[in-house]
Image (cartoon, rainbow, N blue to C red):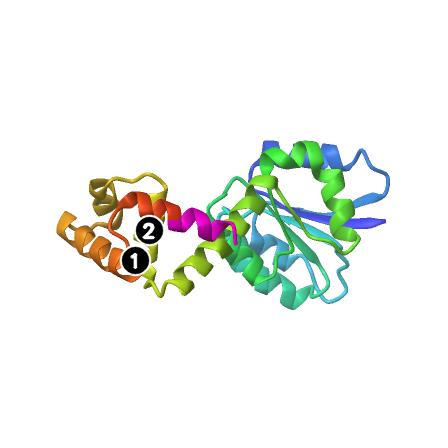
Amino acid sequence: MIKIAIIEDDKTLRNSMVEILELKEEYKIILINSNVESFLASIDSNTQVDILLLDIVLPGISGIDAIPLILEKLPQVKIVMNTVLEDSDSIYDSLKAGAIGYITKDMFLGDIHDTIFMVNSGGSIMSPRIARKVIGFFQKNNFQDKHKLTQKEHEVVMLIVEGYSYKMIAEDKNISINTVNEYIKRIYNKLQINSKGQLFAIYNSQKKI
């Protein structure tokens, strides 16, 4: 019997999750909470939970901030983030904090049984889009390290690669166009290039490494 807990503040989604999970006789839902605080208050050292499906955007303590608090009380629980968020920071911070899976809520409805089976068997799980972002995160860091870019310079490179104009970069970073131009000059100098096309070529070649 796989013991499952859920922390999800959306009542409609929470009920749907329960309905789907209850279709499997090998699952037992131990706890259902709408926030982290009530979950922490309802567990103790004797609580047995195999898998926790944890939302990130919650009232009170966020799902990411909750991970170390939960693992302190339930060190054996396998935490899978179940969220609408797909930004790199949320993914990285969740995995760094101790989550072993990260799925989007649209994936849950169709693939949750495979997810639980894999996680309970000792594996990790990520939505396909999330997996690509994780790979991209490490590719980007390799690019930054290899070319000795500062964090700010690296962020500017990423915006250029994503198609931002210099004006859009200035607005996104809340800096002047002149400052953007200074960043570009330093980046081009470090990469020993002189055009945006060369920047794309270097970045794309790095992705293949």
Q: Is residue 120 left or right of residue 83?
A: right
Q: Nearer the viewer, residue 116 or 132?
A: 132
Residue 182's quadrant in the figure?
bottom left
Q: Within the magenta stretch, is there residue 27? A: no
Residue at image point 45% right, 49% down: 205
Spatial CA span between label 1 and label 2: 6 Å
Give the percent coordinates (x, y) of residue 160: 31, 45
- In the rendered image, which residue does mark 1 sit on? 153
Q: Nearer the viewer, residue 33 or 124?
A: 124
Residue at image point 56% right, 56% down: 37
Amino acid type of the residue tagged 1 in the rendering? Glu
Question: Considering only vertical position in the picture, is 75 above or below 185?
Answer: below
> Start and end of the magenta stretch?
202-209
Q: Is residue 44 left or right of residue 40?
A: right
Tag 1 secondary structure: helix
Mark 2 neighbour class, 10 Å CA radius: few under 14, some 14 to 19, many 20 or more:
many
- In the rendered image, which residue does mark 2 sit on? 157
Tell me, yes or no, whether the two marked residues, 1 and 2, touch with CB atoms within 8 Å. yes
- The kind of secondary structure the magenta stretch mainly shows is helix
Q: Nearer the viewer, residue 100 or 198?
A: 198
Amino acid type of the residue tagged 2 in the rendering? Val
Mark 1 neighbour class, 10 Å CA radius: few under 14, some 14 to 19, many 20 or more:
some
